[in-house]
Image (tube, grey):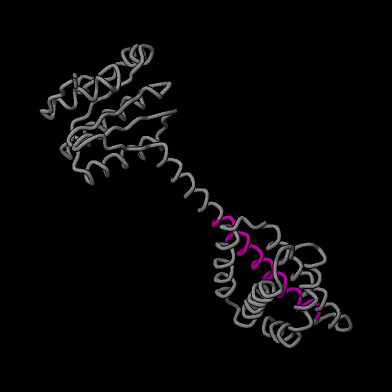
Amino acid sequence: MKKELSILFESHADRLKEEWITEMRESGLLAKMSDTETEKRYTALYNAVVSTFSTGKFDDVERYAKEITEGVVLRDTSVERIIGGILKLRDIYERFIFSEYRDDEEMLYQLLASYEPVANNILTIVTMAFVEAREQVIREQQKAMMSLSTPVLQIRDEILVLPLIGTIDSERAEQILEELLKRIVELTASVVIIDLTGVPVIDSLVANHMIKTVQAAKMLGADTIITGISPVNAQTLAGLGVDLSMLITKNNLRAGLWHAEKMLGFKVIRETE
């Protein structure tokens, strides 16, 4: 029956597509779309649907869904317009089947029984493509925000500073470690200063992450200095019983920079008149 449906939809393509686009335009689903864009987008979808009924495979629909959703999501176009357009096409096809076979009840039921699962699957494919594309955009945005919240700064040759701000959870801790190790290798750093002045709460997770970071940096040839631990956080860490003996700590970033330069053999001379 799928073959019969494909022949039916293809032989009446001009009429059905015109009716479809007219209904979408009247419903406001084509707002801000040019005639050229409308024709291109919905002709491609119509052909993909006909191909699906003809071959019994959803390859063309999946390809169309991937291409259209990536562009629509990136332009932040309303997803409802695309989904609404597919629903309109589904209704038009169904009404057309009724009009063509209303006098042949047996054939009508057979065609509808064949049509509905395919039509529903097409809608599902396009909807899921939108969901996946949207989730991908969200993941990329989160990654970009995480990168911005983890700036690794080169202060001078061989010295990097990582000023941390905000709450650190497991995901961010891993991202921090990955970004820092990458920069150590890229810039051949010998000393890394991790400043925790902007971290409101230091718990066992943060403490263990600091130790893990120090160990990983050491394996790449870089020593680590921790600065900016507040008195409250120092008391918290002492109470947690975390072994911090391997950490070099200084009370502020300035002291950390002086110590880093001393470790590298730099001599700082105050300029006088």
Q: Locate residue 230: give its quadrant.
A: top left
Is 269 inside the magenta-drawn segment? Answer: no
113 relative to 229 in the view: left or right: right
Q: Nearer the viewer, residue 136 or 55?
A: 136
The location of residue 167, given as percent across then percent down, is: 44, 28
Q: Residue at x 18, y 31 (%)?
A: 223
Q: Nearer the viewer, residue 273 or 70?
A: 273
Relative vertical location of residue 57 with respect to residue 179 in this rendering, above or below = below
Quarter of the picture containing the N terminus is bottom right
The location of residue 135, given as percent across then percent down, is: 53, 51
Q: Locate residue 87: give its quadrant.
A: bottom right
Q: Residue at x 18, y 40 (%)?
A: 220
The location of residue 165, given as percent across then percent down, is: 41, 29
Q: Which span is picked out in magenta?
A: 108-133
Quarter of the picture containing the C terminus is top left
Q: Residue at x 23, y 41 (%)?
A: 184
Q: Residue at x 71, y 63 (%)?
A: 32
Relative vertical location of residue 44 with respect to residue 12 in this rendering, above or below = above
Is 131 inside the magenta-drawn segment? Answer: yes
136 relative to 151 in the view: left or right: right
The location of residue 224, given as percent across then percent down, is: 22, 29
The dominant secondary structure in magenta is helix
Q: Locate residue 37: give its quadrant.
A: bottom right
Q: Residue furthest left?
A: 265
Relative vertical location of residue 95 with respect to residue 136 in this rendering, above or below = below
Q: Residue furthest right?
A: 103
133 relative to 241 in the view: left or right: right
Relative vertical location of residue 20 with respect to residue 101 in this rendering, above or below = above
